């Protein structure tokens, strides 16, 4: 696998059907599942590692974001990537950089309401990655369900000739959704973080038992979250997976999402509820602790 720093190098080296896995690095099994899926269905897998300053609204969060390019390159290669692009900030955003992309609708509410400008930053960097890498398929995790809807709308509205694939959330064996921020959860805080998935799984059980009222399902999840000390809930909301539109009754696929602060770590999680099958997608679970905590 080769590590490069410019889109020109990617375009010189990539051939056949190109699969792009956009990331901010510090890989866990969630990222690796995207790279593996890309390797199974495309000829050249390009992984981008770029901690995008435009999508952070707290400078402390940007500074604290974990980074280890050598580790990421080794893991990406093992998972089947051929190219890793790690562009410099000054390459992505030269001094004269005036354009911002805003996907109205899908960017509003939930994360958009709590993280002003976040999705404009995501949409802008993803558009640059699509324009620079020119992938045939791009892979995103369903953990960022609202981001996935934003990216789908971006690709559709700006006619990027790319297929967007969303893959299941990967969780620790006890249910905690993988996130690069999890390495900042230690001691008691780690236990409190489990409240998010526990609350969502309780609502999923109610959905699978036939409950279709969004008010009842969000109440179930919010009540569970509220019983945990050390958890500061920001929101518990449901919206359509396609448009991030609010609904009262679940008649199309929705995601039920939570965001909470545990100590100084902000976490998000969700489950997808499909009224067609009557099933909740809770993601997949690892049998061993994540590689985030030291290995391999
Ligand atoms: O999900 C992420 O890691 C980021 O938001 C993305 C899509 C790589 C854009 O910076």
Image (spheres, grey):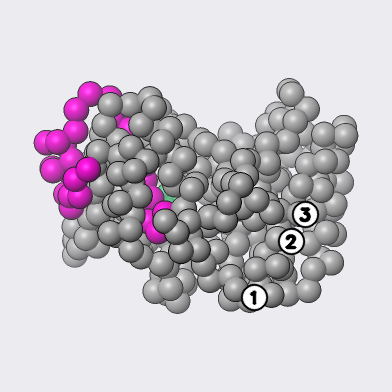
The residue identified by callout 3 is: 199
Q: Mark 2 Cα within 10 Å, few/some/many (few <14, many 20+)?
A: many
Residue at screen point 68% across, 36% down: 281
Q: Which residue is mark 1?
A: 187
Q: Nearer the viewer, mark 3 or mark 1?
A: 1
**Residue 102 picture location, percent across and down:** 43, 49
Closer to the camera, 43 or 130? 43
Q: Is residue 132 left or right of residue 40?
A: left
Residue at the (68%, 32%) spot, across then down: 253
Q: Which residues are magenta?
A: 1-27
Camera sees residue 159: no
In the image, residue 144 lies at what x, y percent? 54, 48
16, above or below 202, in the image: above
**Figure quadrant of the C terminus:** bottom left
Q: Residues within 10 Å of mark 1 (few under 14, many from 20)?
A: few
The residue at label 2 has a CB less than 8 Å from ligand 1: no
SS for callout 1: loop
20 is within the stretch colored magenta: yes
Residue 170 in magenta stretch: no
Instruction: Measure the C-alpha gap from mark 3 to mark 2.
Output: 6 Å
* Residue under label 2: 195
Q: Earlier in the sequence, mark 3 or mark 1?
A: 1
Tag 3, which secondary structure? helix
Q: Quadrant of the N terminus?
A: top left
Q: Is residue 18 visible?
A: yes
């Amino acid at each position: 696998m080769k590590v490069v720093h410019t889109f020109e190098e990617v375009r010189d080296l990539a051939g056949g059907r190109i699969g792009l896995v956009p990331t901010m690095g510090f890989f866990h099994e969630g990222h690796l599942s995207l790279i593996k899926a890309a390797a199974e269905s495309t000829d050249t897998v390009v992984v981008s590692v770029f901690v995008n300053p435009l999508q952070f609204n707290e400078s402390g969060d940007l500074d604290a974001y974990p980074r280890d390019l050598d580790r990421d390159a080794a893991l990406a290669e093992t998972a089947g990537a051929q190219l890793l692009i790690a562009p410099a900030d000054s390459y992505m955003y030269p001094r004269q950089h005036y354009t911002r992309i805003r996907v109205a609708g899908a960017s509003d509410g939930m994360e958009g309401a709590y993280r002003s400008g976040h999705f404009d930053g995501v949409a802008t960097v993803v558009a640059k990655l699509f324009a620079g890498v020119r992938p045939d398929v791009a892979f995103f995790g369903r953990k960022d369900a609202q981001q996935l809807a934003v990216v789908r709308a971006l690709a559709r509205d700006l006619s990027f000739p790319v297929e967007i694939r969303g893959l299941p959330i990967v969780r620790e064996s006890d249910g905690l959704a993988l996130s690069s921020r999890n390495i900042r959860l230690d001691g008691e805080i780690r236990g409190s973080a489990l409240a998010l998935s526990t609350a969502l799984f309780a609502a999923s059980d109610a959905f699978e038992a036939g409950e279709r009222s969004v008010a009842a399902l969000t109440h179930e999840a919010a009540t569970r979250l509220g019983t945990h000390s050390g958890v500061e809930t920001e929101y518990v909301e449901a919206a359509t997976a396609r448009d991030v539109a609010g609904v009262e009754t679940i008649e199309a696929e929705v995601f039920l999402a939570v965001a909470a602060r545990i100590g100084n770590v902000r976490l998000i999680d969700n489950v997808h509820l499909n009224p067609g099958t009557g099933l909740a997608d809770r993601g997949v679970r690892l049998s061993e602790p994540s590689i985030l905590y030291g290995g391999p």
